[in-house]
Image: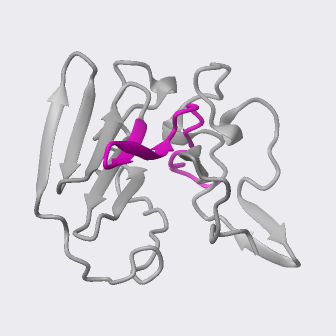
Amino acid sequence: ATVKLSALGEEGPDVFLLQLRFYEDGTVRFTMDENHALVGHIRTRYVIPSGDVIQHEHMPLAKDLEYTYSQEEKSSTFRVGKSIVVKLMHAGVVLTVAVDGQVVQTINSKNHLVIEGTRYEYNDKCPFNMPPSYDAKYIDPACSPGTHDGSWAEEYEGKTDEKPHGPSLVGVDVTFTEAYAAYGLQERG
């Protein structure tokens, strides 16, 4: 699926790609990156290496996959095997994962998805050669009015993390339904 950048307007190009992968063991992987067909190959975002989240680099993809699209809801539904249903609401980019009819995880239900897009030149304030935005519907933290320390380099525990392609934050809200705590989520440091 593709995702629009609201600052480019409804007629603007779909500058981000959303990809879902379904694995035989029931794992569902959700990734986003720039649509390189439109923005070129300036850079590729970091990809979690095999053996980290996906435990086996050659883990087989699910074979028992059924796809339907609802024009009325503007949603895609993926049935994986007999128990897993993944639904993508296109309008708000909301992803819901259910197992045996129970929702276990929802991504972006609070609409907190934010992506800082590709900068073409060093020190470009805004992605895709846009002017600084005052549009409240579009939030790219580094593109908003004012100065933003840390957009091109950050200091942490005495080390400098250079960002040769500028800010590249991807943020989204994730809800683990009926979970009291989440363990093993990465922290900075």
Range drawn in magenta: 94-122
In the visual, does 174 lie left or right of 15? Answer: right
Asked whether 158 or 82 is in front, the reply is 82
Residue at 83% from the left image edge and 71% from the top image edge:
156
Asked whether 137 or 124 is in front, the reply is 137
Q: Quadrant of residue 72?
A: top left
Quarter of the image with the C terminus is bottom right
Q: Is residue 172 visible?
A: no
Residue 179, image x, y percentages: 60, 52
Q: Is residue 146 visible?
A: yes
In the visual, does 63 lie left or right of 17? Answer: left
Magenta run includes residue 117 = yes
Residue at 65% from the left image edge and 29% from the top image edge:
132
Residue 142, image x, y percentages: 69, 42
Magenta run includes residue 95 = yes
Residue 57, image x, y percentages: 31, 83
Q: Which residue appears farthest toward the top when viewing the image?
A: 72
In the visual, does 170 lie left or right of 54? Answer: right
In the visual, does 70 lie left or right of 3? Answer: left
Residue at 54% from the left image edge and 31% from the top image edge:
130
Query: Please, is residue 88 above or below residue 174 in the view?
Result: above
Callout count = 0
Quarter of the image with the N terminus is top left
Residue at 23% from the left image edge and 38% from the top image edge:
77
Residue 18, image x, y percentages: 35, 47
Q: How is the image coloured?
A: one colour
Asked whether 153 or 84 is in front, the reply is 84
